[in-house]
Amino acid sequence: MISIDYIENKLLSQLKKRNIAEKAAVLIPIFQDETNQLHLLFQVRSPHLKWQPNDICFPGGRMEEIDSSPIQTALRETHEELGIEATSIKILGQLTPFLSKMGLKIYPIIGYLSNLNMKLNHAEVAEVFSVPIDWFIANPPTKSHMKIAFKPSDDFPFDLVPYRSKKWQQHSQHEVYFYHYQHYTIWGLTAQIVQSFINIVRQ
């Protein structure tokens, strides 16, 4: 027979799992070039990845049990993907977390790279490139919109819920940003994070 203690223990263990599973972090890497101009470093995801191949993003990923904080997640993922040691990264701060459409709470961590000694993990990263921060300040993003809707499957039991419409139903709509730099297009959540960061430094 199920007891209250049993239910409580199950809920506590589930809460702990969800607390980790629903968190992620990315590093916004800043470096200074030979002309003392500040750049943001981006990576292009490998075309062989099943999830978002060829997309442009910052290094990062889901939080794991070994990570003591989102900062540790960002540093670990940056080392795994770009080969940059944590000792070469000075943490400057972090932005307000973003909530992705997949339900992940993403913590953007800003870090200054004291050197660019990289060894790319080509299983995840195809290439890297940089964009001057001044370019983002001078070039606001293009904006569009994304609509999210529900569509019942063909086997949906409408006889059980006859009040449910068989048509597509819009759930929400949100702005999508696009930055076009050279032959690269930075868009989606990465562009949102960039815009948030630029709005702060512009002030």
Image: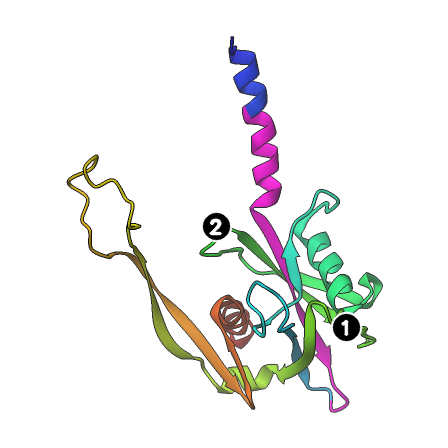
> Residue 52, how many percent across, how many down?
55, 67
Q: Residue at x 51, y 12 (%)?
A: 2
Please name the amino acid that badge 1 sits on: Leu
Closer mark to the observer between disc 1 and disc 2: 1
Q: How busy is the neighbourhood of tag 2: few (under 14 within 10 Å), some, or many (20 plus)?
A: few
Q: Is mark 2 on a helix, strand or loop?
A: loop
Check the image and report above or below for 35 versus 59: below
Residue 128 within the segment the image draws in magenta: no
Q: How far is disc 1 from disc 2 in space, using C-alphas?
A: 29 Å
21 and 105: which is toward the camera: 21
Compared with 166, 55 (above or below) is: below
Taking the image as shown, residue 37 lies to the left or right of residue 108, namely right
Residue 102 in the image: x percent, y percent? Answer: 47, 53
In the displayed structure, 172 sits above or below 188; it is above
Q: Quadrant of residue 83?
A: bottom right
Residue depicted at x 56% and y 55%:
106
Instruction: Give the residue number, with chain letter if any, for mark 1.
Output: 120
78 sits left or right of 177 in the view: right
Mark 1 or mark 2, earlier in chain: 2
Quadrant of the image occupied by residue 71: bottom right
Task: Using residue 19 as the reference point, say whether residue 66 is left or right of it.
Answer: right
Circle 2 residue: 103
Amino acid on which the number 2 mark rests in the picture: Gly
Front-most of 200 and 50?
Answer: 50
Span shown in magenta: 11-35
Checking the image for residue 167, the label placed there is none
